[in-house]
Amino acid sequence: MKQIYLDYNATFPTRTELFQKLLQNTASYGNPSSIHSFGRKARQTIEDTRHKLAKKLHVTPDKIIFTSGGTEANNMVLKGFFRETVNPNIAVLATEHPSVLQTATFLWGQSLHLLPVLKSGVVDLNHLEDFLQNSKTPSLVSIMYANNETGVIQPIAEIASLVHRYQSLLHCDAVQAFGKIPLHFKDDRPDFITLSGHKIGALQGVGALICLNNFSYEALVIGGGQEKGRRSGTENVLGVSSLGLALDSYDNDISKESQIRELRDYLEAKLLKIDPTIMFFGKDAERLPNTCSFASSGLLSETQVIGLDLEGFAISAGSACSSGKTKRSHVICAMGTCEIYANAAIRVSLGPDTTQDEIDAFIKAWEKIYLHNSESKKEARG
Ligand code: PLP
């Protein structure tokens, strides 16, 4: 059976050509801290990738700290701020990824301030301003660029200027926006930006924290002093190298933005024809072009994920980190959606290589599951 991958927000499958180049480039690498030629070659790869990434993001290379991924970068900011600040005060968006939400809950417990979102999934800016006005000390605000489940994009420049007006700091988890849309970090930029390599086709286990603020926090990982003492441990040369190679496709992948959006909108129009009561989450906000999060009332998320897997389609229920646990999505609930729809939410996320034929095949497979479920419900009612 042909396998069709529609789960790009979980991970972007590494391209075969990238693997081949990676093996050629890194076959004889040493430890980047070694001074012999093997070590120097590894160091060069890391610094070349740092420069490449800096150029894409219009930042200087010294602002980039390589990490093991988005989760570690998010932990670095929140834990660093918590330890180094007197009376640390934080607000995080209710729809953040668990690597922000869980870390903030672990550190701040009851005093964590959750910022609500409007029904559209966009932050309630009035609420954010109230929080900043009432904070006695400068705060850290953590708001993601784009949501992993719904694709909803937050007005980051507007948020940054509001946060900075109150002498506070902004952390932005840009993991999902990275490689899908051009990242607009203009004059008023977040102080910290989180990125992850595997969302753009690099290997899993590499990411970066961009510190536009002078990051003077004590490191989370202490040891040999790598990354200028900000993140110890022998660098993941293979991972960082794969990030550099994935960046070669970055502009081309982003240039397919409108083609991907057209396919996504086509998918949504067809699904709506099958079930006119279907609910699309985040549809009233600016969204990532590749993400379609929807629910058909009474058709459970698990039924769809398992049924579609049997038909050869890879999709998700809620975020990848909570799939397998199939618990109701906190993102959909925070948007004020009733239980019956929240239990039915699934996410289809397209990539630059997704074709119309694949989307047509998906629609057919989903319709089969939908009709089967409707028939079963009719029979149960007698
Ligand atoms: N932040 C967001 C918005 C994500 O979607 C993810 C992963 O799905 C992460 C953080 C975690 O990144 P990583 O898998 O590199 O740890």
Image (spheres, helix red, strand yellow):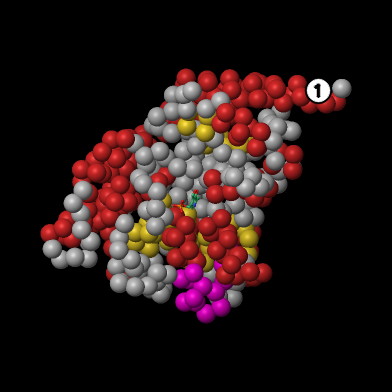
Q: Is residue 22 above or below residue 231?
A: above
Give the residue drawn at x 75%, y 21%: 375
Amino acid under disc 1: Lys
Q: Nearer the viewer, residue 100 or 302?
A: 302
Q: Residue furthest bottom?
A: 86
Taking 303 as reference, is 87 left or right?
Answer: left
What secondary structure is marked by label 1? helix
Q: Position of residue 223 (x, y in %)?
A: 34, 73
Give the residue drawn at x 30%, y 72%: 224
Residue 83 among magenta residues:
yes
Q: Is residue 96 above or below residue 225?
A: above
Give the residue drawn at x 58%, y 61%: 102
Q: Position of residue 301 (x, y in %)?
A: 65, 37
**In the picture, which quadrant includes the C terminus?**
top right
Q: Is residue 269 above or below residue 71?
A: above
The residue carrying pointer 1 sits among few (fewer than 14), some (14 to 19) or many (20 or more) residues within 10 Å by Cα, namely: few
Q: Which residue is mark 1?
A: 378
The part of the image, by quadrant, that contains residue 229 is bottom left
Q: Nearer the viewer, residue 22 or 129?
A: 22
Residue 281 visible to an observer of this rendering:
yes
Residues rendered magenta in the picture: 79-92
Taking 237 as reference, is 172 left or right?
Answer: right
Give the residue drawn at x 33%, y 40%: 250
Some atom of ligand 1 lies within 8 Å of the CB belonging to the residue at label 1: no
Q: Nearer the viewer, residue 98 or 165?
A: 98
Q: Nearer the viewer, residue 85 or 312?
A: 312
